[in-house]
Image (spheres, rainbow, N blue to C red):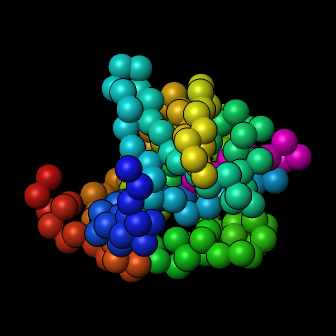
């Protein structure tokens, strides 16, 4: 059974997701990052999450070779960071002027993120056009103040303002 690819994409645009920036450090020592919404928890014991990346993405090889990555969960209002890491600008330009530091694994951690999951790559699987990266969470960094996350749906950024106030 085959479905129409345009209908599938239209349906997925209705699935709101938190906006994250995946980061790593390439084999040559360069910081690499990209905007992603396909991230979710797999297991709490041990803590493992997954992220999906298109195999044609310019950052793909760096994430495959690094053996580690960080998931930086962006707060509402961080449209500029999300857009910066979704464009075709160089990785050096993406990190230029940002407040960030290296984690214990070597991945860049973006200051101001709601949560950052520092992960060791433990497994991957190829499914169609994408690779699923499974990362064992080695450390979690939480923002001091709870804020609403940046969300993406219908091709636009937004937020769910009551998310932080209801917790």
In-front residue for pair 10/110: 10
Magenta residues (range): 22-29
Kindly tell me whether residue 102 is visible in this rendering.
no
Residue 159 highlighted magenta (yes or no)? no
In-front residue for pair 116/1: 1
Dividing the picture into quadrants, the one containing residue 96 is bottom right
Dividing the picture into quadrants, the one containing residue 99 is bottom right
Kindly tell me whether residue 58 is visible in this rendering.
yes
Residue shown at the point (54%, 33%) measured from the top left: 135
Residue shown at the point (67%, 52%) measured from the top left: 55
What is the x, y in percent for residue 68?
Answer: 65, 36
Give the residue furthest to the right: 28
- Total marks shown come to 0
What is the x, y in percent for residue 39?
Answer: 44, 48
Whether residue 43 sits left or right of residue 163 in the image: it is right
Whether residue 106 sits left or right of residue 75 in the image: it is right
Residue 113 vertical placement versus 127 (above, below): below
Give the residue furthest to the front: 1
Whether residue 42 sits left or right of residue 25 in the image: it is left
Residue 65 vertical placement versus 91 (above, below): above
Residue shown at the point (70%, 58%) measured from the top left: 56
What is the x, y in percent for residue 15?
Answer: 30, 63
Give the residue furthest to the left: 166
In-front residue for pair 129/152: 129
Residue shown at the point (60%, 38%) measured from the top left: 126
Residue 19 vertical placement versus 27 (above, below): below
What is the x, y in percent for residue 153?
Answer: 34, 72
């Amino acid at each position: 059974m085959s479905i129409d690819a345009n209908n599938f994409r239209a349906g997925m645009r209705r699935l709101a997701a938190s906006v994250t920036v995946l980061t790593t450090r390439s084999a040559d020592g360069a910081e690499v990052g990209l905007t992603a919404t396909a991230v979710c928890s797999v297991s709490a014991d041990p803590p493992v999450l997954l992220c999906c990346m298109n195999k044609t993405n310019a950052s793909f090889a760096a994430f495959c070779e690094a053996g580690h990555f960080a998931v930086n969960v962006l707060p509402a209002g961080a449209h500029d960071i999300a857009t910066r890491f979704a464009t075709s600008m160089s990785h050096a330009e993406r990190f230029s002027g940002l407040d960030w530091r290296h984690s214990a694994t070597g991945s860049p951690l973006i200051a101001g993120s709601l949560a950052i999951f520092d992960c060791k790559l433990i497994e991957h699987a190829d499914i169609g056009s994408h690779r699923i990266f499974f990362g064992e969470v080695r450390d979690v960094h939480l923002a001091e103040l709870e804020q609403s996350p940046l969300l993406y749906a219908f091709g636009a950024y937004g937020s769910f303002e009551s998310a932080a106030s209801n917790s």
